[in-house]
Amino acid sequence: MMKYIALLRGVNVGGKNAALNFQNISTYINSSNVIFDTAATDILNLQQQCQAAILNHFQIEVPVAVISVTDLKTVLAHAPAWRGVAPESKHNAIIVIPPVDPATIIAEVGAAKPEYEQVFNYGQVSFWSAPLKTFSRTSWSKITAKTSYGAITIRNANTIKKLISLAE
């Protein structure tokens, strides 16, 4: 069995769906974080199954990023040293939902403004930190106005750490 985390975009969820043959299903802080075990290994297929289950049950289309706990740990092992350090800053992980390519998101958002923010990209994740005082001046805070906004989901540093802790 592999352990996965499904990161749902734009909904708060609670509950379980046994119809997918997932086991040990749990959610975290009702903010669209679902941890589960399954023998399946095809990430895109798992993503499609989760999206279909949500559509069938709630009649809404919800983009879902699925990542194995192992892969998420690898991503975090490559996180920049500045991530999560400054106490008066937001520290987010922006996860690109396949099949969208991270380069598409990066190109649309544009270059980071080093005087206001720090951004580091690794795989499907962009680590982004910005001081609260100048947050509204950052390039990446404008992502909500971009056409590709529906192809990402954002989690703060504490949520990512907690998800890994809960999954272990």
Image (cartoon, grey):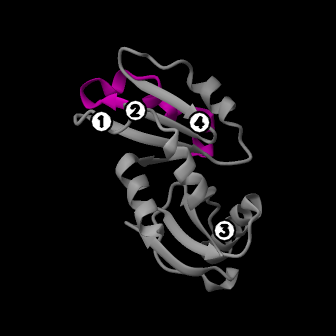
Relative placement, left or right, of 86 versus 44 is left
Name the secondary structure under disc 2. loop
Give the extent of the magenta segment: 129-152
- To which residue does mark 3 refer? 50
Labelled pair 3, 2 in contact (Cβ < 8 Å):
no
Going by the numbered disc 1, the residue's amino acid type is Val
**Earlier-in-chain disc, 1 versus 3:** 3
| Mark nearer the viewer, 1 or 3 | 1
Q: Is residue 68 above or below residue 57?
A: above
Residue type at mark 4 is Tyr
Residue at (48% x, 62% y) in the render: 32
Bin the neighbour count of mark 1 within 10 Å (Cα to Cα): few under 14, some 14-19, many 20 and up: few
Q: Position of residue 151 (x, y in %)?
A: 63, 44
- Measured as percent of width and height from the top left, residue 100 is found at 71, 41
**In the image, residue 123 above or below residue 49:** above
Placement of 93 over or under 107, stated as above or below: below
Residue that numbered label 2 is attached to: 81
Badge 3 amino acid = Cys
Residue in the image at 56% along x and 25% along y: 109
In the picture of the structure, the residue carrying the numbered disc 1 is 85
